[in-house]
Structures are given as C-alpha cells and as structure tokens.
C-alpha cells in the first residue's frame, strides 16, 4: 500500500471509527502525542489526551447522521470534504486538511465549518 493509501486509511478510522461513533477514546490511538490544530480558535498545540478530554462532553449530547466524506491524499497530507448532521438538526459542512507523521495525525487545518450547512449528500464525491 502507498503512503497516501496508508494515510487515507488512518483518516477513514478517524471518521468511521471515532467521529461516526463519537468514540473519542480512540484519539490517542490515531493522533500523535503533539497535535497542532489551526482552527477557528487560532493555532494551538494539544496532546492527544487533551483533545480527547476536550471532546468527551459532546459524546453524550450528539448523535451523528447523514455523514459522508471524500478524501484526497498527497505525501503526508490528507484533505477531507465532508458533511454530517448533529442530532438530525444542525448540518455541518467542512473542508479540512491533516498532516500525518509516522502513522499518526500531527497537524490539522480547519479554517471554518459551515454550521448551517446546505450541501447535499450527493454533492460529496464517492470514496
């Protein structure tokens, strides 16, 4: 398997195993010990455990549905185009890029997420 395919496989685990099931216990398995996030809160570095703890409160509050994404990979980078609904109400659409190092997520760029999403599932390319 190529590096790009290995990296996409990691991202499929991130989305299919962790996010789809809100199984945040998997974060230390998938993210490196130092995880740099460039997102709407600015740039910050967290440990995998800190990121897990940050997300745990939503696990009991959210249900993810209508979840679809498409992955593109180049070298150490994987970009995801995706959409999902939270609690069958609020739709979030996103484009996010990740950097992978030694089989772990170590950096991500998520400049914005449309929280009043309008993308149709059919608009996301097939995996």
Image (cartoon, grey):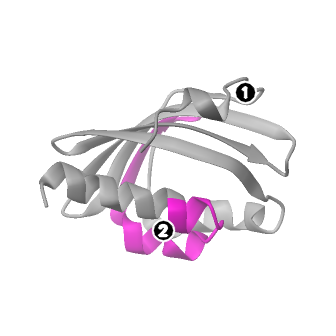
Report if residue 124 lies within the magenta region.
no
Say whether disc 2 or disc 1 marks the residue closer to the N-terminus: 2
Which part of the image, by quadrant, shows the C terminus? top left
Q: Residue at x 65, y 66 (%)?
A: 22
Judged left or right of residue 3, residue 82 is: right
Q: Residue at x 61, y 71 (%)?
A: 23
> Would you call the spot at circle 1 few (<14 residues within 10 Å), some (14-19), or many (20 or more)?
some
Judged left or right of residue 125, residue 57 is: right
Q: Residue 99: give x, y in percent of width and height.
A: 29, 45
Residue 10 vs 36, above or below: the answer is below
Which part of the image, by quadrant, shows the N terminus? bottom left
Q: Residue 7: give x, y in percent of width and height.
A: 26, 54
Residue 60 vs 112, above or below: the answer is below
Compare residues 120 and 30 and report the one nearer the observer: 120
Indicate the quadrant where residue 30 lies.
bottom left
- Label disc, if present, on residue 36 of the rendered structure: none
Q: Which residue is mark 1?
A: 117
Q: Which residues are magenta?
A: 16-43
Q: Residue at x 68, y 28 (%)?
A: 120
- Label disc, if present, on residue 27 of the rendered structure: 2
Front: mark 2 or 1: 1
């Amino acid at each position: 398997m190529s590096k790009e395919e290995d990296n996409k496989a990691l991202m499929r685990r991130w989305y299919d195993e962790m996010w789809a099931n809100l199984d945040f216990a998997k974060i230390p398995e998938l993210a490196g010990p130092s995880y740099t996030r460039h997102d709407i809160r600015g740039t910050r570095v967290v440990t995998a455990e800190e990121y897990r703890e940050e997300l745990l409160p939503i696990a009991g509050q959210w249900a993810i549905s209508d979840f679809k994404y498409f992955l593109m990979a180049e070298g150490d980078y994987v970009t995801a185009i995706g959409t999902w609904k939270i609690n069958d109400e609020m739709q979030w659409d996103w484009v996010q890029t990740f950097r992978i190092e030694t089989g772990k997520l170590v950096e991500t760029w998520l400049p914005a997420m449309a929280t009043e999403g309008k993308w149709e599932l059919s608009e996301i390319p097939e995996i």
